[in-house]
Amino acid sequence: MRITVLARCALVVAGTFLVASAPQAVHAADQVESITLSPTSKKYTFDPGSTKEDSFTILNDGEVAYDFLVYAEPYSLDPVTSQPIYQGSKAANADANTWVSFAQTRWHIDPHQSVRVPYTIRVKDTASPGGHYGVIFAETQPQSSDTQGVSLGRKKRVGMIIYSTVTGDLKPAGAVKQIQIDGYQSQTPLEASVHIENTGNTDFFPTVSYRVEDVFGNTKYQTTSSDHIVLPGITRTIPMSWDQASWLGFYKVTVSTTVLGNTTTQSSYVFVAPQWFILLVVVLIATGVVYAIRSHQTRRR
């Protein structure tokens, strides 16, 4: 009986090994499809009526060949959420896409190859001074299956943002609208944010510093960033966070923001603790108060 059980176990193990080691058929959908655009943004300064010839590169580091289309759309940021808005943008300065043209809009790229895509920017003679914005997209196109069964059934697109400034009466203007540091935070990461308003007609890059200190004044985390662009007519929210904060701790958070040469700094103390810990403390305090009252009443009797 024991030999029979061992034999059955050996057959199961052997069968599992044979299935695992057998060659597996690779379906077409398992092959990697990839599209990368470089660079992801370009910044220009133009005179009204000027023309610029330029290009970007599409890289296919996947396993599937495909066709792709190139086209331009408006670009702006939502004034509340700071999220990108493309085709539906109604911002007056989201019009740089109308200046972009392509000699060729449909391209083919093979696996592990790159393609240089040229384009032309023709600025209108009537373009107003200040910032104008758009985005160039490259979008893969579905193909019918070939002799090997390889096909693309969905579209992917990547984009390059165009930040352009038209010369003339430029009016850079903006300020820090609010620095938000919540004094109590129930979980990590330890967060803060700054809201920056652009009231001018051209974009700018603020410098934002974020520092966290412990109760003894020791710096636990510090970072400085100058890579968030603020477009004209919007208030952009720039978030900051530190994910190494303790689940229970007391910190001093300092945010310093420089906008067009003017610096605003704000510091606040932050208590980090989960809500269950706060509830536990409240229950313990309430229990202690009740116990003290009853003890006092008992002694009076």
Image (cartoon, grey):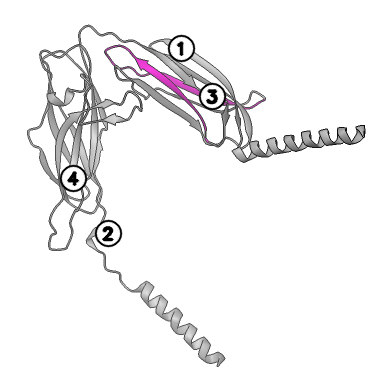
- Where residue 182 appears, as percent x and y from the top left, is 54, 26
Cβ–Cβ below 8 Å for labels 1 and 3?
A: no
Secondary structure state at the residue bearing disc 1: strand
Secondary structure state at the residue bearing disc 3: strand
Query: N-terminal of the two: label 2 or label 1?
Result: 2
Q: Which mark is residue 140?
A: 4
Query: N-terminal of the two: label 2 or label 4?
Result: 2
Give how far apart the Cα atoms at labels 2 and 3 are. 45 Å
Residue shown at 29% from the left, 17% from the top? 233
- Which residue has dot 3 on it? 211
Q: Quarter of the image holding residue 15?
A: bottom left
The kind of residue tagged 3 is: Arg
Kindly give the residue lying farthest to the bottom in the view shown.
1
Residue shown at 43% from the left, 10% from the top? 262
Mark 3 nearby-residue class (10 Å; few <14, some 14–19, many ≥20)? some
Q: Which residues are magenta?
A: 189-215
Cβ–Cβ below 8 Å for labels 2 and 4?
A: no
Mark 1 nearby-residue class (10 Å; few <14, some 14–19, many ≥20)? some
The kind of residue tagged 2 is: Asp
Position of residue 6 in the picture relative to residue 34 (left or right)? right
